[in-house]
Amino acid sequence: MRRLIALVIAVLVVALGLSFAMLNAESAELNFYFGQLSMPISLWMVIAVVVGAVLGVLSSVGMVFRQRRQLARLRRQIADAEKELSELRKLPIRNNP
């Protein structure tokens, strides 16, 4: 059922994207320092969204790796603490007056 819902949503998104592209078929010109490029407005917008998504993923990669390192360090600390606790539980209990 989940796959069907995802498929329906994907088809709707594609249909909306195609209708958006048809409504914005006018050509727009972008001037670079070394030349110019003319493409439909909808294609320029798709390129902008893709570039934004790629930049967003690249900017979060460092944070994800840092959190993974921290998680590994914390797991090692937990393992060490559990090992120490198990060793302490093995020691006999002494009553000091």
Image (tube, rainbow, N blue to C red):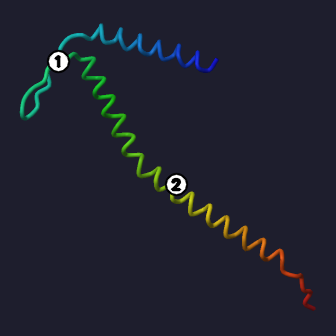
Q: Quadrant of residue 43?
A: top left
Residue shown at 60%/62% (left/top)? 74
Q: In the picture, which quadrant includes the C terminus?
A: bottom right
Q: Is residue 29 above or below residue 18?
A: below
Q: Is residue 6 left or right of residue 80?
A: left
Element class at badge 1: strand
Residue type at tag 1: Ala
- Position in image of residue 24 (x %, y %): 27, 11
Q: Which mark is residue 28?
A: 1
Lateral position of residue 46 relative to residue 29, left or right: right
Identify the image quadrant of the N terminus.
top right
| Residue type of the residue flagged with mark 2 | Arg
The residue lying at 39 percent from left, 41 percent from top is 57
Mark 1 and mark 2: span between their CA atoms?
A: 44 Å
Q: Residue at x 47, y 13 (%)?
A: 11
74 in relation to 97, above or below: above
Mark 1, other Cα within 10 Å: few <14 / some 14–19 / many ≥20: some
Residue in view at x 53 percent, y 59 percent:
70
**Residue 69 at x, y percent in the picture:** 51, 59
The relative height of residue 6 versus residue 50 in the rendered view (above or below) is above
Q: Which residue is mark 2?
A: 68
How far across and down, in percent of the image, does residue 6 sit? Answer: 55, 19
36 or 3, nearer to the observer: 3
Mark 1 vs 2, N-terminal side = 1
Q: Quadrant of residue 86?
A: bottom right
**Is the residue under label 2 in contact with that under label 1 (CB below 8 Å)?**
no
Q: Secondary structure at mark 2?
A: helix
